[in-house]
Amino acid sequence: MGEIARPDLCVIGAGSAGLSVAAIAASFGVSVILVEKGEMGGDCLNVGCVPSKALIAAAERAQAMREAAAFGLGVRRPKTDFAVLRAHIRGVIAAIAPNDSVARYTAMGVRVIRAPGRFVDRLTLVAGEATIQARRFVVATGSRPALPPIPGLDGVACLTNETIFDLAEQPERLAVIGGGPIGLEIAQSYRRLGCKVVVLEAHRILPREDREMTEAVERQLLREGVELRQGVAIASAAASEGRIVLTLEGGDTVEASHLLVATGRRPALDDLGLDMAGVKTQPGGIVVDRGLRTSNRRIYAIGDCASGETKGYRFTHAANHHAGLVIRSALFRLPARLDNTLIPRVTYTDPEIAVVGLSEEEARARHRTIRVLRWPVAENDRAQAERRVEGHVKAITTKDGRILGCAIAAPGAGELIPLWTLAIAKKMKARDLAGIVIPYPTVSEISKRAAVEHLRPVSRNRWIRGLAALLRRLG
């Protein structure tokens, strides 16, 4: 019989969620085993957040070259060397990889086992030659691309986020199935890098987001030459003479040299033996409560593989937040309750869309009276100076000004949303944000200007105006 290990904590999955749990737990001096069958760093480092942002950074520079003439700069039309671009992406991954390496976590005191893990009963996981009976387990195995049931799709060469970043040659025409964040970020980037791009979406692009925000992105994509086909269904896919042919319901066809499928993700739960551990699952992942516990009270699930109370918040920062909650509960038996309204999300198109808290629709359903505060990016001096004026901020408050939610479509919206996240977490009111001093000229002033809009009715109040008039007469 092999070794039996009895650590305080066993974490399955070395992506963002699992690494965060392991690092925090080890810092408190508890024994931790980390089990990972694939690459350290998981999807975020290797095929997700990191390579996609490296791609976006390259595309932004290409677009800046195109727009330079408006600033009096004469430049050539950008030409992309995709082999060098791939090297750039790989270089960024390599620069960050040591932070997630086996060596670093071993130095922290974490025992890393590079092997698949499988539960054999409610208390036992087998990984390689080790049999692990931990006091608590954390499943953090992430997610994988989900392919839609399109007839013929399995017979064509299609790309996903796991393979798109390995292209060393420029696609002549890229078709993207899926108008969500991943599909649009890559579509805009490849268009900026010189490719023809068509996006096919069954509903509308970014269906989860406020339409006021998505319209700003849609306008920019169309200006840049991305072809958007919304409200279309794909009847079949086929390969023909070196091309990919997508036939739409109704008979229209779309041809492309390359096909990216970006229609969502599914939890990575294969071969974990969750049934043997008494862990309930559903199509969206492992069912968890607000404390991120599964139906087996000794096992937690966090990050992309979790479902139920996580409500599909599949983001690296959400996974890191989950990790902190699990540490509170698993190590210190403190109360830990997930509150998704405190988790922001960002779509890294240009302009970006950043959202936190309740939407206008959600707020109206929960509160009798709300106020909607807006301020356009075009009214911001820094945005005008940089000629990036698409979008606006939209904040939702109660009648007395308590901030319930905020959505921003703007350049760098992801850098602007933390202020609103803090405001919601601390139950601040619009007047609190209206009173802070923000440096001029910065795009962040749009947040303050939106908050000031809550005070505008005060200036129209006849009693306040009367008081001001009286004080003027008194000198």
Image (cartoon, grey):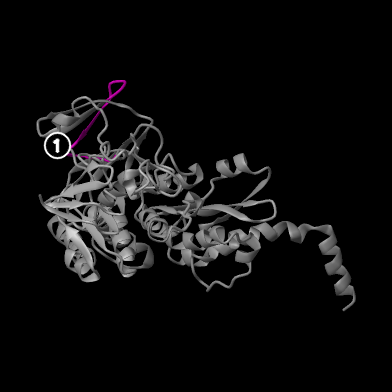
Vertical placement of residue 166 versus 149, above or below: below
Q: What residue is shown at x 32% (from left), y 64% (from top)?
A: 25
Q: What residue is shown at x 23% (from left), y 43% (from top)?
A: 119
| Magenta stretch, residue numbers | 248-262
Q: What residue is shown at x 35% (from left), y 46% (from top)?
A: 181
| Quadrant of residue 146 within the rendered picture | top left
Residue 9's x, y, as percent?
29, 57
Dominant secondary structure (helix, strand or loop) of the stretch shown in magenta: strand
Residue farthest toward the top in the current orientation of the protein: 250
Residue farthest toward the bottom in the current orientation of the protein: 475
Q: Is residue 431 visible?
A: yes
Residue 162's x, y, as percent?
20, 47
Q: In front here: 396 or 296?
A: 296
Q: What residue is shown at x 12% (from left), y 57% (from top)?
A: 83
Q: As drawn, is 222 to the left or to the right of 116?
A: right
Q: Is residue 56 visible?
A: no
| Quadrant of residue 400 within the rendered picture | bottom right
Q: Which amino acid does label 1 sit on?
A: Ala
Q: Name the residue under label 1.
A: 157
